[in-house]
Amino acid sequence: MEAAEILEDLWASVHEPRDLFNAALARVAAGHRAHAIRYWETYLLLPGIPADGREQALARLKKAQAATVGVNLKLVPAAVSEVGATYTLRRAAPDLKDSRPPVVIELPPGAPEFSAGGRTVYLDAGKWELKVEARGYRTAVQELAIKPGQSGFPKEIVLGPDPMFRHASFQIGPPEAISAGATVTLQRMTAAAQPVPCPLSSTGACALKLEPGDWEVVVSAPGFQRYTEKVSLGAQPTASFAVALVPTVAPPPVITPPTPTPVAAAPATPAELPAKPETVPRPIRLKLSTALVASGIPIFIGGLALGVTGSNSFQDGRTMGNSSAELLPSLRMRSAGMGLVGAAVGLWTTGLTAEYDVKPVVWYSELGVGGAFLLSGAIWSAVGTSRWNRNEVPKFHCTNSEGIDCFASHRMASSFFLGAGAALVVGSTLGILVQRKYMKPRRTALSPYFAGGGAGLVLQGRF
């Protein structure tokens, strides 16, 4: 089983088809045929598989299927096919050492399994937990008891609607835009949100089940202006929107207000005003923000590890009465760890700023603060190093410490300023570069100026 886990990790990191094939062999050797079947099914769908490898995978797949029990899973209602579904099968093993990973099967919207009588999964004997998830429906969890030598059987899973989701429908026009290949994409206005396509029918209509909140709608078609608008899904269970695309030479379209359900009378909701144009598109801002925040996580973890290790080594040395020279390596380790922690804080700060469409002055302010931190940390560190080289460490005096302990506190603080300043400079510079890429070009003009008895030149423009 350890060999299977190693090969599975290799497949997840490298995506080498041979590792997936061998992981299936290792699972068969451990008696985990359900996992091997899923691996070989995935292997056969990969591009560029050699003919002999395909033949071996097919032969072993059929042999493993014959030794397991086929369960035909059928989802109800049929509308689930519009959003797709995910099956997660987990072995409910009584042996705690049996750490098999879950078997995950994803059915995309409109998958043939929805109209061909269901999806058949092959399971080993024992108890299995089946979890079925679909957007807009409640998650269904059922237990499957598989007996040795049992014949295959059908299993119907009924998914109930999730009341937390809202039904949003869109009508796109004109017909020429639909014929040209119009597309509708929605994206939740939160960090790291994934776009959700809304497939259009031949009449330009589509519908989705979405979580309540603010969504960005993007409608585009060749030869027509790209339309972007924010829509809010709130208390009403359903909402309808209409977007009329116009040719590229026409003014931007206007979205109609959502039509509330006739359950209770309510005043008409006015159409939202067009959103203020953004300097940097939101998807670009979110990518930059995510990159800065994510890059700070491993730096923070590494800095924390260095700081704790260096602190423990420093305290042990102080207890043993080591000299200042003997304590220097642990001091350097503590300082390096604190510098990395400061760098992580700086990256997180600029990452939060990148999420918003701020003015250039904000980025330049952060650049100035980062430069000030960097300069202060460098001067602070240089002063401390100079006093160390002159053997003036005993002259250090702090509120709660003195000597080498006070010097260590100063060195950690200066390292934090250095790391935070460097990260602020890097992050704000990236923000400025990205913003300048999307800012409108500046227009300037130089003209003569005459007033009274004086004259000069006037620089006019947009900065």
Image: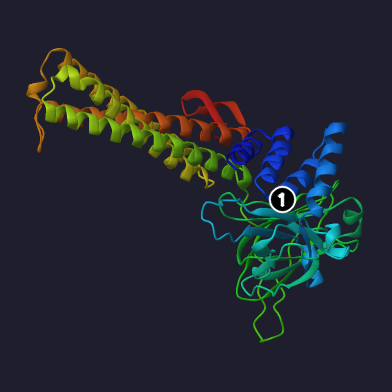
- Compared with residue 78, is residue 70 higher up or lower down, i.e. above or below? above
Report the quarter where the N terminus lies.
top right
Residue 343 against residue 216 in the figure, above or below: above
Q: Is 224 or 352 nearer to us in this picture?
A: 352
Is 307 on the left-hand or right-hand side of 203?
A: left
- Depth check, front residue: 377 or 59: 59
Colouring rule applied to residues: rainbow
Quadrant for the C terminus, please: top right
Residue at 57% over, 43% down: 285
Closer to us: 463 or 131: 131
- Furthest toward the top, the residue is 390
Tell me where residue 198 sits by quadrant: bottom right
- Return the x and y of residue 260 as percentages of the image width and height: 69, 78
Q: Is residue 9 left or right of residue 411?
A: right
Which secondary structure lies at badge 1?
A: helix
| Residue at 71%, 42% in the rendered image | 24
Circle 1 residues within 10 Å: few <14, some 14–19, many ≥20: many
How far across and down, in percent of the image, does residue 108 sit? 77, 55
Residue 21 location (% of width, % of height):
74, 38
Q: Residue furthest front?
A: 149
- Taking the image as drawn, is residue 383 in sight? no
Residue placed at 73% from the left, 45% from the top?
39
Amino acid at the residue labelled 1: Arg
Residue 192 at x, y = what percent? Answer: 58, 49
Q: Which residue is mark 1?
A: 33
Task: Find residue 175 and report its image quarter.
Answer: bottom right
